[in-house]
């Protein structure tokens, strides 16, 4: 499994934007489609809210990629 770290520049990042900013998709719209498809988990639970607020300490998983979100 590939692990990435993402440092927040604020209080939170929207889930679809996180996928874009980490390079897992090309745009926020593509991120929304991935989330809507049920392919993304946050802290081990499937997340279907495209703009869910992801905060420091959470772990987002898409396929074999795990993103640890860290405080900026």
Image (tube, rainbow, N blue to C red):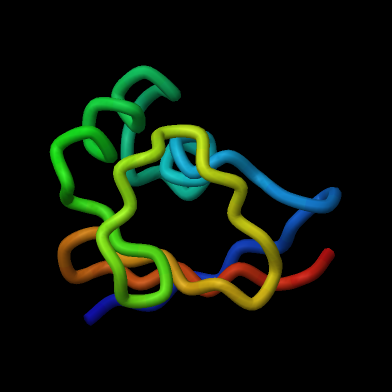
Q: Is residue 66 left or right of residue 22?
A: left
Q: Residue furthest top?
A: 29
Question: Where's the C terminus, which quadrant?
Answer: bottom right
Look at the picture and state if 34 lies above or below 56.
Answer: above
Q: Is residue 54 left or right of residue 72?
A: left
Point out residue 59 in the picture as x, y percentages from the top left corner.
Answer: 47, 73
* Quarter-of-image position of residue 57: bottom right
Q: Is residue 21 left or right of residue 13?
A: left
Look at the picture and state if 65 lies above or below 29.
Answer: below
Point out residue 12 in the picture as x, y percentages from the top left corner.
Answer: 72, 50
Look at the picture and state if 33 lies above or below 66.
Answer: above
Point out residue 48 in the picture as x, y percentages from the top left corner.
Answer: 30, 43
Q: Is residue 11 left or right of residue 17?
A: right
Look at the picture and state if 60 lies above or below 44.
Answer: above
**Front residue of 54 and 69:** 54
Q: Residue at x 30, y 68 (%)?
A: 45
Question: Where's the N terminus, which quadrant?
Answer: bottom left
Point out residue 35 in the picture as x, y percentages from the top left corner.
Answer: 28, 39
Q: Residue at x 56, y 72 (%)?
A: 58
Q: Residue at x 75, y 57 (%)?
A: 8
């Amino acid at each position: 499994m590939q692990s990435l770290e993402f440092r927040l520049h604020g209080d939170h990042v929207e889930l679809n934007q996180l996928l874009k900013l980490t390079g897992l998709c090309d745009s926020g719209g593509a991120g929304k489609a991935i989330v809507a498809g049920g392919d993304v988990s946050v802290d081990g639970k499937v997340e279907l809210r495209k703009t869910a607020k992801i905060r420091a300490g959470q772990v987002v998983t898409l396929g074999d990629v795990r993103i640890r979100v860290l405080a900026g």
